[in-house]
Image (cartoon, coloured by chain):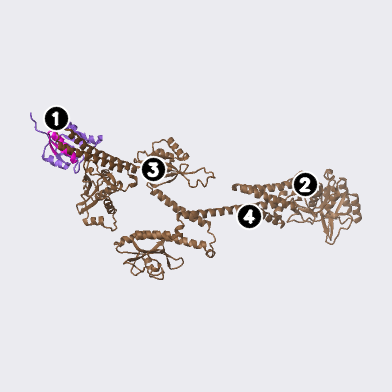
Chain colours: A purple, B brown
Amino acid sequence: MNQSPKRILLVEDNKHLRELICLALELDSYLIEARGDGREAIDFLKENEVDLIILDLFMPVLDGKYVLHWLRNEKKSNTPVLVMTAMTDAKTLLNIMECGANYVMNKPLHMEQISTAITKLLDV
Amino acid sequence: MQNYKSVWTGLFILILVWTGLLLNAYRGIDQWLYQQEIVSTLNPHNIPSSVVVVEARQSFFYASYEEWLDVLVKLNLLEPRAIVMPSRPSTWSELQTKKLITEYPLFLGKTLSNTQETMNDEYHAGLTLLPPIVGKTYPQQWLTYEVNGREYDSLEASVAKKLVGSQFKKDRFFVDFRYAKGRVPVVEMERVKNNEMISSLIKNQVVLIGFMDSLTPELLTSAGNLSFSTFQAYALDTLLNQRSIVFITLPNLLVLSFLFVISLMVLIPRIADRYQIVTLILIMMAITFSSWLLLMNWGIWISPAIFLIAEIVIFLTLYYQRHNHNKVMLREMALNSAHSMESRWMPQNFFMTDEHWTQIANMVSQTLSLNRTIFLEKIEDDHRVREVKAIDCSLADVHEMRRDYFRAPYTTAMELGGILRLQKEYLTNASEPEIQYLAPLVFAGEVQGFWAFTVNQNNWANEKKMLYAVSQFMAQISEMLFHRSQWLNHQATATNPITKVLNMQFDEPAYSAIHRTIQFMNQRLSVMESVLNGMKTSAVLYDVFGRVVQVNEPMVEILSAVNIATQTMTASELMSQLTECSLTESRAYINYVIVDKGTVNLPVNHKGLPQGYMLSVKGIRNEREHGLREAEVRPFELLGILCEMVDMSHIREVFQQKEQVIEHLNTWLRNDLSCITMACDLVKDQRVKPEKKGEMLSLIKEKVAALENNILKVSQIIQTDLASQASAKYPVECMKYLTYAIDRIEQENLRSVIIEQMTPYFSPLVMAAPTELQSIFDTLMNLLYKDTVENGKIAIKVCANKGKVEFEFANEGFGIPNEHLQFYLNSDELLDSDDFKALRTIKLQIEKWGGELVAKSAVGEGMIFTFNLEAFSENESVT
């Protein structure tokens, strides 16, 4: 049975990384929507639904934590969220999980790592 | 001469006491002492006498020859050695007298009724003479007496010569009155007449017949009042037993007194001051006792008065010398220390050269942007002024030629009591349009001089501000002028002998020097205390015994918060209280500080005290004088123990800043590495088109270069000495300081002001200095909090974007007219409000860092402040 491709929202302020992730996910046949900061992401999510959100934590204007908070508390959405962060300290990671992240992935990223995580989250 | 001072003193004392001796000045003292010493022996004493006094009534002198014969026969039967009668009874004929003298051992004396009478008969043995009076007493008796050019023996001498064969060379002798009371027995004639005499009383004794109610008054002697016959009996007894009191001869007395003076001159200076009085009394007692001993045992009278006087003179002289020496030394010390303190307080060359005043004039002129300036001082005892120092002008440029400060414009300036803007020209030869001022320089309520200056109106648009700045310098310059005039006066007096004589200022009194020294020391101590209190480091100074010498205010403030009273504890106890070490350990540390000259640094660990303090304990030693006093015994080289609570939070802050930079670097590296790893993965992927792979490779190269650049940038920051560049720009985690400012407001938030924050989760690094950045946040938060209405809101937004971090602080408050806020922010006018003064300061600070502060306000709405600061890296917003 042919399944329709999953829609993923990628929110990442780093232009190069955003493009690279987009390319990698497109190769895996996902439909990608990319945004550069938290404000743009919220604006998009107010009108659209996606199957998965890949969210960078630190971004200008509104950061990932704010977006996550909005998603869970204001939009009341259960969309799985994969958070990417360069922070490695346990306190930050725990805090993100408490805010409603489904998966936290430490940078630097690898294609395989992202694919596995997405597969896992979408399966759930 | 100075070396032989004691010799000269000794000679002076000898000459003094010898002169007194030769002038008989001590006779009174000697007589009194002699009297007292003899009197002290008057208790009955078992010394046998050779003479017995038989006293008859005066009427018996006129008794008939037969009655006298009867008495003589009865006496003779008792076998006396001799019978002595002071004079021949008038009832005896010459023949009868001769017969009695032949048949009985009878010695008759002769009383001379006038000076023409001579003793030219055969039956008189000697002259009956009243003894010579010395002072008020009769200590002596005659041996011989000259009558009409011929010497005759006294009755006592004559009897003694005949009975014991004594030979006498002098004309008088001292009667021995020692143990005088009852020594010579006195019996009444009636007992002889009645044959009641005991044979043993008379046998082999010399019987002296006297008369109890004679016209001769009683004689005052050392033994008390004696009748003349009893006195004669003592005199005769003295001669018969050869017990005459011997007086020391003058040469002997001179030699003895010489030796005595020399001995004391050697001895007394070696006796400690506190024992001197006791020594004086002991020596006086020894002299008196020796004289008593010699008199009693050997009948030698040494005239102790000269020794006593000599001793007192020596003591007084040496005391005076020592006192005088101490006074001179004290005075020298006082003058030296006064001089030393003065030179430490105000270096003398400050007044001696023109250089310092040139520096002052230049500094003032440059700081205040003055065109021309001239300092004038009052001439002492005159009404004119003279130039101290001038910049770009001179006294010759002063248009007013009298230089009389009792006239305008000086009097006008004095009446004004401040800076006078001159309407008429005061300084001539102006090169450009300028305003002229004259300021009186007043110190301690007295005008010391004047300060004339000119300014270019273009340099000081705000005259009020300029005058305020000038007035700040006036007080300081006035004081310096006062010290200068004091010094000039002192110099004039000290160097001009005529002035010294006229002022009768031959020498500065010691008390004046000491007073001045104490004043200087007080002043210096006050300054040192102020310095100690003004130190940021909390410090307490203990002496070597662990007692507190000085505690500065920061230390009192810190420790009183945790109820630690430094005054009641020793250095080791304080160390033990503040750190984790036990009292035994802290004592060991103190021992290390004292004995091994070490310094101990321990982290302060006390529940009530903030973290980040270090307790530093070190010994304060007088190292500078060590070399000079090497030969001296220095039991306490250590002057004290200094305990300092050093606030290490700044250093911790510096390390934290570096940690933050490294943390940010880590984030950037991971981001850049993400690009590289993702690009590598895609290059390896077969599904990616070749042209895309080329782009990936270019990206990888670009990111590697960016990585290198970031690492280099951070390395430079890490190597920067932040402690010495506290006010320079440095990557600072701004959110930390913003949080502190918010916390402070929230702690004292009595008006329930709500603080809303829209801030990034990951604090961006801004290029700033921590202290100043904190001050910026505090100032803005204070200002907004004061302006915010009750239950109002303060909204804070922080956003990093395009290499800048933007801050916005807004409130719902009363607000002020916007033009007022802009005036406060941009004008140079003096402000009364500390908040707006601070606002102007932070604006300048933000601009210094390359940012910009914009403020808006509206009445009834509140205020809004926005500013931006340079972000450490573009990466701050790209994570």
Q: x, y percentage for residue B409? A: 37, 68
Q: Amino acid at mark 1?
A: Asp
Are the residues flagged by discs 2 and 3 from a single subunit?
yes
Q: Residue B66: which disc?
A: none
Q: Chain of mark 2?
A: B
Per the image, the residue denoted by label 3 is B645
Say which element carries label 1. helix
Q: Amino acid at mark 4?
A: Met
Are the residues flagged by discs 2 and 4 from a single subunit?
yes
The stretch of residues the image draws in magenta is: A8-33
Per the image, the residue denoted by label 4 is B1
Callout 2 touching callout 3 (CB < 8 Å): no
Asked if residue A13 lies in the magenta stretch, the reply is yes
Which of labels 1 and 4 is toward the front?
Answer: 1
Per the image, the residue denoted by label 1 is A123
Q: Nearer the viewer, residue A62 or B265?
A: A62
Disc 2 versus disc 3: distance between alpha carbons? 94 Å
Are the residues flagged by discs 2 and 1 from a single subunit?
no
Which of labels 3 and 1 is toward the front?
Answer: 1
Viewed as shown, does residue B498 lie left or right of B554? right
Graded by Cα atoms within 10 Å as few (under 14), some (14 to 19) or many (20 or more), the crowding at tag 3 reads many
